[in-house]
Image (cartoon, rainbow, N blue to C red):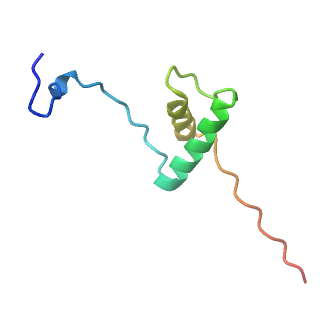
Amino acid sequence: MQVNRAGLSPPSQFKRYTMVQRPVHMNAFEFVVLSSLRAAQLMRGCTPRVHSTQKMIMTAQLEVAAGKVGMLAPALPVPVL
């Protein structure tokens, strides 16, 4: 195994990671916040809604991307006349 000057092995030996694509209707901030909240739920013992062998944060991202979990819109205040 060759090592370059930075002490790293060649790029061909790096681990490949998959990136979850967020839904088009959701901005990046919403995706991250929702995924982190869902990951916290999974760590507390909630049942995953998609089958995955990944870590809990990746499972949470997959659930959000698949539309299995979502945000509830805050209720609009009722105008008082």
* Quarter occupied by residue 39: top right
User: Residue 7, can we see it?
Assistant: yes
x and y percent of residue 29 in the render?
Answer: 50, 55
The residue lying at 24 percent from left, 25 percent from top is 14
x and y percent of residue 11 in the render?
Answer: 17, 28
Q: Is residue 17 above or below residue 35?
A: above
Left or right, 22 with respect to 14, comes to right
* Quarter occupied by residue 42: top right
User: Most extreme residue toward the right, as rendered?
Assistant: 81
The residue lying at 51 percent from left, 26 percent from top is 55
The residue lying at 80 percent from left, 70 percent from top is 77
Q: Is residue 61 above or below residue 14?
A: below
Q: Quadrant of the C terminus?
A: bottom right
Left or right, 41 with respect to 65, comes to right
* Quarter occupied by residue 50: top right
The residue lying at 70 percent from left, 52 percent from top is 72
Left or right, 31 with respect to 10, comes to right
User: Most extreme residue toward the top, as rendered?
Assistant: 1
User: Residue 27, can we see it?
Assistant: no
x and y percent of residue 51 in the render?
Answer: 57, 22
